[in-house]
Image (tube, rainbow, N blue to C red):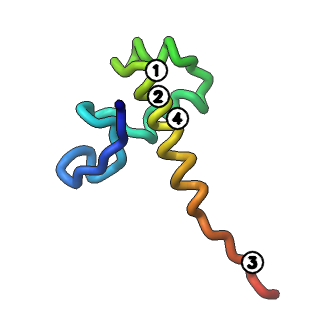
Amino acid sequence: MTKVVVNEKIRFGKPIIDGTRITVEEILGALAGGMNFEEIEKEYGVNKENILAALKYATDVISEEQIGMLKV
């Protein structure tokens, strides 16, 4: 099972795919830039499970986000 880890000694502590130096940010950026899973797998040396783990991590982070309204 692929997981996302944070290690302050690797990539300045950014979340990475376990066992790699590929960041969640890189994978999300590639997807946002229009790359498909197959292209990302080839370019970054990851697999579909890794890409899905990055997406799950990002979803989990966003689901915890608190949005406050400013009083005017």
Which residue is drawn at the image coordinates 31% and 46% (left, top)? 5
Real-space CA distance between mark 1 and mark 3, rounded to the nearest whole angstrom: 38 Å
Real-space CA distance between mark 4 and mark 2, rounded to the nearest whole angstrom: 11 Å
Real-space CA distance between mark 1 and mark 2, rounded to the nearest whole angstrom: 5 Å
- CB of mark 4 within 8 Å of CB of mark 1? no
Name above or below for residue 48 compared with residue 18.
above
Q: Which element carries disc 4, helix, strand or loop?
A: helix
Closer mark to the observer between disc 4 and disc 1: 1
The kind of residue on which mark 3 rests is: Met
Which residue is drawn at the image coordinates 34% and 18% (left, top)? 45
Left or right: 12 as drawn, with respect to 26: left
How many numbered badges does the structure rendering display?
4
- CB of mark 2 within 8 Å of CB of mark 3? no
Which residue is drawn at the image coordinates 69% and 76% (left, top)? 68
Residue receiving disc 3: 69
Label 1 Cα neighbours within 10 Å, binned few <14 / some 14-19 / many ≥20: few
Q: Nearer the viewer, residue 63 or 68?
A: 63
Label of residue 51 in the image: 2
Residue 14 drawn at (x, y percent): 34, 49
Disc nearer the start of the sequence (2/3): 2
Name above or below for residue 34 compared with residue 16.
above
Label 3 Cα neighbours within 10 Å, binned few <14 / some 14-19 / many ≥20: few
The kind of residue on which mark 1 rests is: Lys
Residue receiving disc 1: 48
- CB of mark 1 within 8 Å of CB of mark 2? yes
The kind of residue on which mark 2 rests is: Ile
Which residue is drawn at the image coordinates 28% and 53% (left, top)? 13
Q: Which element carries disc 2, helix, strand or loop?
A: helix
Residue receiving disc 4: 29
Q: Residue furthest bottom?
A: 72
Closer mark to the observer between disc 1 and disc 3: 1
Residue 37 drawn at (x, y percent): 52, 18
